[in-house]
Amino acid sequence: MRDIIDDLLRVWHSGRTGGLATIVRTVGSGPLTVGTSLLVDANGAVYGSMLGGIVEHTVQQAAVEAARTGARGMHRFGVPASETGSSTGGMVDVFVEPFSRHDFPEFPNIAAEIAAHRRVTLFTVVWNPDPDLIGQHLITGKRHNTELVALPDSDLFVVSFAPPPRLIVFGANATAAALTTQARLLGYRVTICDSRETYATPEAFPGAEVVVDWPHRYLNTLAAAGEIDSSTAIVVLSGDPKFEIPLLTVALRLPELGYLGAAGTYAAHTRRMEDLRAGGFDEQTLATMHSPAGLDLGARTAGETALSIAAELLAARSGRTGQIRSPRTAPVTDQRAFDTAEQAFITAL
């Protein structure tokens, strides 16, 4: 839902009714993610995506029907093997509901909490013997897993929106502007920091917070305030040693960090490592830094460099190497194992 918040708000404020479909449970293989939502507005425009192909088309039609009739309920769809990338396919349960001011009066509160980078959790009744209770919503600020919860007399779907991970880019330049766009697409809250006020202007970095301060001082301030954690990423784009070395000295001493990258040429990398070794850092500590930052994509322009850094950032976040994926045949799954999983899934209902 987070990726279509603006579209949902637009439909909500229009006063018209759309249809909202959300994946609440999956079984079998495939790229479907629990909590993924799709919106169809009153004009038939579709926002968000689930998988594509036959399943997505069927979900869209169910959403249109919910908007037209006001019906709320669970739908089960079989997912063909051709759409899961496996040899067996799977199944998906989707909750479909009308979406409007009348149907979801609490929605602007959720959007406001997400925009303010605060945790918010939404509980939705997706099944109950009393049909009037289906589709009811409850909002809290408590942390919870995103999952379908089966109670004795009701099924609740819980989706929790955590504050987005943060990317702090030091150095206000064209690569920083391009990286801001890339990182926001990956779900990051982006901050640009530079000590040069003429370069660090909000207009040059739409969608990012812009801070004018000495890099190492700003990072120290954030660390002291407890605003750096294992999801935080730092990218250093300033190659000037008088900015870069004090900053990296602070960054390498942080107790936890999701990603630390320093851009530049291999000559700059060599000089950087020599300076940091002279400052007392050992090889094990220096190995935690990505230098030069970015996957080897042959990047030449600012946009290409930003793409290579964003790709490495995603690989680090996912625990992957960033190597080229070779074509491979999916392993054959024992049909009996799939049948057992399917039966267990049905029994759990």
Image: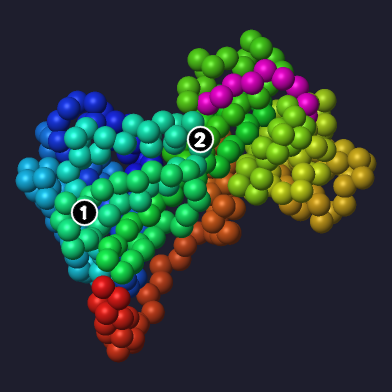
- Residue drawn at (39%, 51%), measured in percent from left and top? 159
Q: Nearer the viewer, residue 52 or 339?
A: 339
The residue type indicated by label 2 comes to His
The local crowd at label 1, few if under 14, some if 14 to 19, many if 20 or more residues have their Cα within 10 Å, is many
Between circles 1 and 2, the one closer to the viewer is: 1
- Looking at the image, the residue that sits furthest to the bottom is 336
Vertical placement of residue 59 versus 196, above or below: below
Residue 68 visible in the current orientation: yes
Image-based side of 221 in relation to 13, left or right: right
The residue type indicated by label 1 comes to Ile
- Residue drawn at (45%, 66%), measured in percent from left and top? 326
| Disc 2 target residue | 117
Residue 240 visible in the current orientation: no
What stretch of residues is rendered in magenta? Answer: 208-217
| Disc 1 target residue | 134
At which x and y percent is residue 88?
28, 77
- Residue drawn at (14%, 31%), measured in percent from left and top? 16
Contact (Cβ within 8 Å) of mark 1 with mark 2? no
The local crowd at label 2, few if under 14, some if 14 to 19, many if 20 or more residues have their Cα within 10 Å, is some
